[in-house]
């Protein structure tokens, strides 16, 4: 670079002391120059540094490649945990729903059982009513009636299980009452009946046949019977005592105001009171049964 | 802008062209040939790494000298931090001693001048080497050193006064 060397007040960048020349001369005198060896060593170091940088770049690239994998793995784990939590939560909710659903189904099964018990009763009501009014004796010996009796026994068996459970499960009975459900009273299967006794109002006993007990059950199956909170007033009109072979007695006391008291020694609860629809009609049918 | 695939060859060309400037400038700071060679290698490794960032705002030589001066200052700073005897300041004060003057008198004129420059305080040496040894303008030197142009001029004048004072009657 050309320097300003003219003027009385020279520019400060003027090398009036010839410093550059002195410095170069000093270095040349000392032969202080860049050697070929220094250049080669430096180039070697540059190549090493380049390789190192390349390795670092490769490592960085690998890190960049690996990093998303870790991040995705973390995200996947988070999603999995979230999904598991949601699944568990929903499962619990479903479980609760299933529980409540099963309870409802249980209630429904009771209701359905009761309805099933009631519906055939109405069907049998017509049949038995016809048989009873037109030719009761013929009905006793016919196979059709025998089948009908067997069918009635099955229904009573179902009804019995309900009546047996009801006292033990205190909450079930009121619910059945509240639901205005139909129900049949406790019964003993024909083969298990040891004796069937009629007690009249005066207290005298009348031994009746086992078939009469079955007829009594058939007759009760024709009516809708509901558990009730009301207590009977006065003395019963008819009282039937069915004794099982296990010496367990089931007592049926029929009152005028359509009340039926059933005392089942097989159950913990002694006496259950029911109301019977068309109670007067039932009493008249019972009168016919006794006369037979 | 240098192409990446030409880095090695270009850096070699740069070393051959500007190597002496780098090596000698480094020596002016560290005052040791081996240390100057270390600085030389460090500078050109850095030049090779940063060559793609060179925008051409200054000459390539100015850019390389800037890297050299910064490398020397970093070395001096680290040496200072490591409790190594700091080169510049100590020798600045001893420069005025009669023994030193006698030793300088025994050296040739150029070596005496070089040592006088070496022993200048760094801030004066910076601008002196940039302007007189590396042929930069005051403006370029000021920009390289990160100082105002007026500051560079005053430092340059002060450096010359110091040199004249130290070399009075000998050159």
Image (cartoon, rainbow, N blue to C red):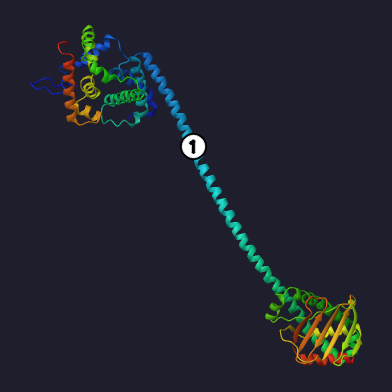
Decide: few, some or many residues near mark 1? Use Cα within 10 Å; few <14, some 14-19, many ≥20: few
The quadrant of the image that shows the C terminus of chain A is bottom right
Task: Tell me: residue A136, above or below residue B128.
Answer: below
Residue A227: quarter of image? bottom right
Q: Which residue is mark 1?
A: A63
Which residue shows up at 70% across the image and 78% down it? A174
Answer with left or right where residue A179 lies relative to residue B107. Answer: right
The quadrant of the image that shows the N terminus of chain A is top left
In this view, the residue in front, A120 or B35, is B35
Residue A137: quarter of image? bottom right
Task: Tell me: residue A99, above or below residue B106.
Answer: below
Residue B152 in percent (x, y) is at 19, 27
Outermost residue to the top: B106
Answer with left or right where residue B21 lies relative to residue A226. Answer: left
Task: Tell me: residue B131, above or below residue A168.
Answer: above
In this view, the residue in front, A157 or A186, is A186
Answer with left or right where residue B64 lies relative to residue A239. Answer: left
């Amino acid at each position: 670079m050309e320097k300003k060397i003219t003027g009385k007040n020279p520019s400060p960048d003027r090398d009036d002391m010839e410093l550059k020349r002195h410095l170069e001369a000093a270095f040349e005198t000392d032969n202080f120059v860049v050697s070929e060896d220094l250049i080669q060593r430096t180039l070697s170091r540059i190549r090493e540094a380049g390789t190192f940088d390349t390795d670092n770049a490769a490592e960085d690239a690998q890190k960049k490649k690996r990093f998303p994998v870790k991040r995705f793995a973390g995200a996947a784990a988070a999603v999995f945990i979230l999904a598991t939590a949601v699944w568990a939560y929903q499962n619990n909710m479903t479980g609760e729903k299933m529980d409540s659903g099963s309870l409802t189904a249980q209630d429904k099964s009771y209701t359905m059982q009761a309805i099933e018990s009631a519906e055939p009763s109405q069907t049998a009501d017509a049949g038995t009513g016809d048989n009873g009014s037109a030719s009761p004796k013929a009905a006793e010996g016919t196979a059709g009636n025998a089948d009908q009796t067997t069918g009635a026994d099955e229904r009573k068996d179902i009804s019995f299980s309900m009546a047996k459970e009801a006292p033990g499960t205190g909450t079930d009975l009121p619910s059945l009452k509240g639901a205005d459900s139909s129900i049949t009273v406790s019964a003993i299967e024909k083969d298990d009946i040891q004796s069937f006794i009629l007690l009249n109002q005066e207290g005298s006993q009348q031994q009746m046949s086992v078939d009469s007990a079955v007829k009594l059950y058939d007759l009760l199956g024709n009516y809708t019977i509901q558990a009730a909170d009301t207590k009977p007033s006065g003395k019963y009109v008819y009282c039937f005592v069915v004794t099982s072979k296990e010496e367990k007695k089931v007592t049926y006391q029929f009152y005028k105001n359509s009340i039926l008291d059933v005392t089942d020694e097989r159950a913990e609860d002694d006496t259950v009171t029911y109301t019977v629809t068309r109670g007067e009609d039932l009493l008249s049918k019972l009168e016919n049964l006794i006369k037979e | 802008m240098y192409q990446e695939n030409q880095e090695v060859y270009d850096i070699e060309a740069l070393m051959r062209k500007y190597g002496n400037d780098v090596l000698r400038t480094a020596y002016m700071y560290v005052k040791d040939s081996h240390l100057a060679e270390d600085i030389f290698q460090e500078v050109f490794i850095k030049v090779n790494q940063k060559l793609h960032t060179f925008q051409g705002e200054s000459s390539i030589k100015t850019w390389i000298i800037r890297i050299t001066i910064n490398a020397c200052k970093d070395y001096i700073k680290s040496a200072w931090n490591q409790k190594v005897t700091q080169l510049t300041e100590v020798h600045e004060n001893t420069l005025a001693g009669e023994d030193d003057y006698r030793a300088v008198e025994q050296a040739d004129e150029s070596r005496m001048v070089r040592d006088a420059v070496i022993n200048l305080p760094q801030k004066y040496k910076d601008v002196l080497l940039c302007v007189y040894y590396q042929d930069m303008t005051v403006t370029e030197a000021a920009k390289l050193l990160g100082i105002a142009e007026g500051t560079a001029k005053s430092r340059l004048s002060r450096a010359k006064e110091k040199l004249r004072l130290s070399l009075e009657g000998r050159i």
